[in-house]
Amino acid sequence: MIRPIAKDAEIPGASYDVVRVGLIGRGIQKSRTPAMHMAEGRAQGIDYRYTLIDPDAMSGPKRLLAELIDNAETAGYTGLNITHPYKTLVVDELDTLSDDARNVGAVNTVIFRDGRRIGHNTDFWGFAESLRQNLKGVRLDTVLQLGAGGAGAAVTHALRSLGVRRLLINDRSEKVADVLAAKTGAEVVTDPSAAAQADGIVNATPMGMAAHPGLAIPPDHLEPRHWVADIVYVPLETELLRIARALGCHTLDGAGMAIYQAAKAFELFCGLKADPERMRRTFDTFGAQP
C-alpha cells in the first residue's frame, strides 16, 4: 500500500560522483531529456548517465513496467523518469509518494533510496512555471483542458494553483475525466466546442507527438482571442500550435514544461539544484529537429 510522505524536502538529498538514471516510456527515442540531464551533470562535475528504456524499441517480447523498474533498481540506478503511458500505472510499483505525486495521482520521477521506491511529480511544477514565465497576464477565468491522463492530472493541478476559476476537461474516456474532475472540482465536457466558453486551451494529450499525429480539437473551435498551450515538444511546433499562431493566438509550446520538470527531477536525483537556463540552452541545441 502507498504511504504518503509529508514533503519532498523531507527526503534527504545526496550528491554523487556517478549518477545513473533512465526514462521509461513508449516511442521516446527523440526525447531531449537525456541530453539536458547529462549536460547539466557535466556542468556540475558529475558523471551522469541517462538511458532510454523504450519497450517499443526492444526486440523480442515487450517487457512489463514492473520488470523494467526491477531491472533498473537491481542495476543500481539512482532513479527513473516515467512518461507516457506509464505515469499512473507506475504508482502500483512504488512504496511511497510525495505530496505532489499523491495529489496529482501520477508519477513522472521515481527515486530509489534505502531500499524504497519514492514517487514524485515534477510535471506539476514544470507546467505551472512555464505558464507563469511565458504567458504572463493571460486571462485565467475559464480554461479548457484536453486530456485527463497522467500528464493531464498534473496540468489540472497546475492550472488550479495558478488561479483558474473554471476548468473544463475533455477526454475521449469520460470515466477518466470524471475521476479527475471529482478530485479537482473541474467540469467534464463531452465536446471540445466548449472552447467557446474558454479564455485558454491546453492540450494535455499525446496528440501532436511524432508518434501520435493529429489534433485533439477541431481547428474551427480556435479563436484569435484564445491563448493555446501544448505540453508536446516533439515536434516543438505541433499542428495545434501552428494553427493557433496563424490565427494570432498567444501560444505556449511544450519546451518550458519539459525544461522545468527536468530541472526539478535533476535535483531529486542528485540533491543539487539545476540551472533551468543552462538546461534550456541544451534543449535549444536540437534546433528544429523533430
Image: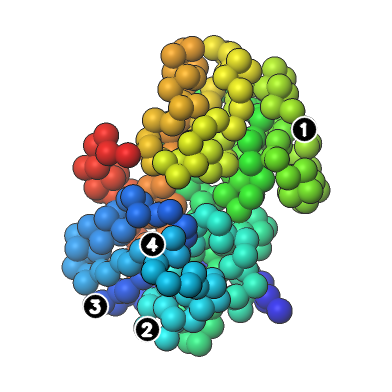
Query: 73 or 162, which is in the foreground?
Result: 73
Marks 3 and 2: which is nearer the front? Answer: 2
* Amino acid type of the residue that numbered disc 4 sits on in the rendered structure: Ala
Marks 2 and 4: which is nearer the front? Answer: 4
Whole-number angstrom distance, CA of label 2 to CA of label 4: 20 Å
* Between discs 2 and 1, the one toward the N terminus: 2
> Which residue in the protein does label 3 denote?
17
> Which residue in the protein does label 1 denote?
190
Crowding around mark 3 (Cα neighbors within 10 Å: few <14, some 14 to 19, many 20+) is few
Quadrant housing the C terminus: top left
> Which residue in the protein does label 2 denote?
75
The residue drawn where x is 31% and y is 58% is 34
* Amino acid type of the residue that numbered disc 1 sits on in the rendered structure: Thr
* Between discs 3 and 1, the one toward the N terminus: 3
Marks 4 and 3: which is nearer the front? Answer: 4
* Amino acid type of the residue that numbered disc 2 sits on in the rendered structure: Ala
